[in-house]
Amino acid sequence: MEIKHPLPPFNKETAQQKIQMAEDAWNSKDPVKVSKAYTVDTEWRNRDQFINGRDAVQTFLANKWQTELDYKLKKELWAFSDNRIAVRFEYEYRNENNQWFRAYGNENWEFDANGLMQKRYASINDVAINESDRKL
């Protein structure tokens, strides 16, 4: 049985731990490593895409990081309750034409009793920026 500490119910400290772990994993840009934080049957909405299952998450992330180059992410706690965490985030990346972007968004996370994320709903907006305007 897979277990991913800290486990729900979350308090401020454990919610922030979970967020930092997610930030670190996503910044590794390793789809397999990232996917291990999710249930095998995880349910995602990412922008206009609906992604179901850990294998689909790995494929999605591999494709994402092939087009979002020099990706760097920062996540912040918005709210938490029992087995749910809401996160505000921003990340920066460039495309193959060296155009830089900053993406802003919110995620709603729901965890199972073993601390694996079973649901992830993300709303994301991208803004083109100059390289000199990068913050991350």
Image (cartoon, grey):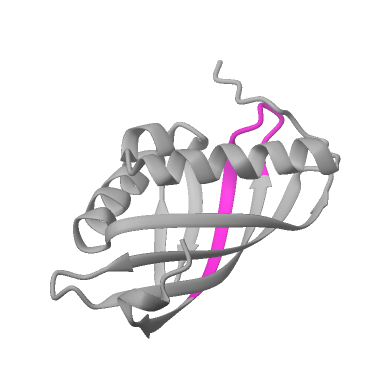
**Residue sitting at the far front:** 132
The part of the chain drawn in magenta is: 111-124
Image position, residue 88 (x, y; %): 64, 64
| Vertical comparison of 71 with 103: above or below | above
Seen at 42% across and 38% down, the residue is 34
Find residue 22 and report its image quarter: top right
In the image, taking residue 123 as reference, residue 81 lies left or right, namely right
Q: Give whichever of 4, 129 is nearer the camera.
A: 129
Quadrant of the frame with the N terminus? top right
Q: Give whichever of 67, 55 is nearer the camera.
A: 67
The prevailing secondary structure element of the residues shown in magenta is strand
| Vertical comparison of 79 with 41: above or below | below
Seen at 67% across and 36% down, the residue is 112
Image position, residue 111 (x, y; %): 67, 41
**Residue sitting at the far left:** 97
In the image, taking residue 69 as reference, residue 102 lies left or right, namely right
Image position, residue 47 (x, y; %): 44, 72
Image position, residue 29 (x, y; %): 33, 44
